[in-house]
């Protein structure tokens, strides 16, 4: 009932549906298949995101990173940190401001990557490795760490990134 009350467009679409009077059976029609039948294979292929895979679990949860750092990173990667942005999504009525720069709204992206105060840490890391890291988002940073580095350098970079976060 809530959905219908708060979505005029959905209400209009529902009201335009014409129901048949005859005794024919209803049939589900899946657009992604040729015959309209939904199979688990078609559902998996439709929902599966293809592309390069970064095994976050093995990169983040390991012996060279303290579990407390991995935990914060894992929560950030799964959008579970209690930032103002996420608290608003959960229904909290709050005024949002970044606790570091006091100028922008507190979102995960701003707080960890775009804030001028946070960018100082990222710039120091980039200077230390004499190479730029792609830092528009979390997965970009991890992809940059896993690039053309030796296994030991990757581990040190990932540990540094997790400590910065």
Image (cartoon, grey):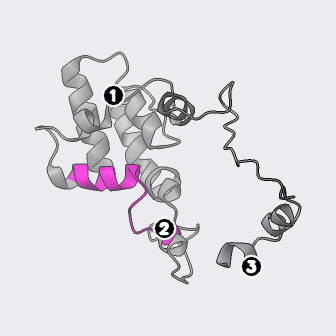
Residue 22 x %, y %? 83, 53
Specify the segment rendered in magenta. 69-85
- Horizontally, residue 133 falls left or right of residue 29, namely left
Residue 155's image quarter? top left
Circle 3 sits in a helix, a strand or a loop, which is it?
helix
Tell me the residue that label 2 is attached to: 86
Point 28% across, 33% down: residue:
157
Choose between 78 and 6: the one closer to the eye.
6
User: Principal SS element in the magenta part?
Assistant: helix
Q: Which is closer to the viewer, label 3 or label 1?
A: 3
Tell me the residue that label 3 is attached to: 5
Q: Which mark is residue 129?
A: 1
- Horizontally, residue 79 falls left or right of residue 136, namely left
Point 66% across, 78% down: residue:
2
Circle 1 sits in a helix, a strand or a loop, which is it?
helix
Residue 156 x %, y %? 22, 32
- Horizontally, residue 75 falls left or right of residue 11, namely left
Q: Which is closer to the viewer, label 3 or label 2?
A: 3
């Amino acid at each position: 009932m809530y959905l219908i009350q708060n979505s005029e467009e959905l209400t209009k679409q529902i009201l335009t549906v014409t129901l048949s009077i005859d005794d024919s059976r209803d049939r589900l029609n899946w657009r992604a298949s040729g015959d309209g039948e939904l199979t688990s294979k078609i559902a998996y292929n439709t929902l599966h995101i293809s592309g390069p895979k970064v095994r976050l679990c093995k990169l983040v949860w390991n012996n060279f990173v303290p579990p407390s750092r991995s935990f914060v990173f894992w929560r950030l990667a799964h959008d579970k940190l209690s930032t103002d942005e996420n608290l608003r999504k959960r229904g909290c009525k709050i005024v949002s401001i970044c606790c570091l720069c006091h100028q922008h709204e507190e979102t995960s992206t701003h707080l960890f990557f775009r804030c001028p105060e946070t960018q100082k840490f990222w710039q120091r890391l980039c200077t230390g490795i004499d190479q730029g890291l792609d830092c528009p988002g979390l997965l970009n940073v991890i992809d940059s760490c896993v690039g053309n580095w030796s296994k030991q350098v990757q581990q040190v970079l990932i540990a540094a990134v997790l400590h910065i976060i």
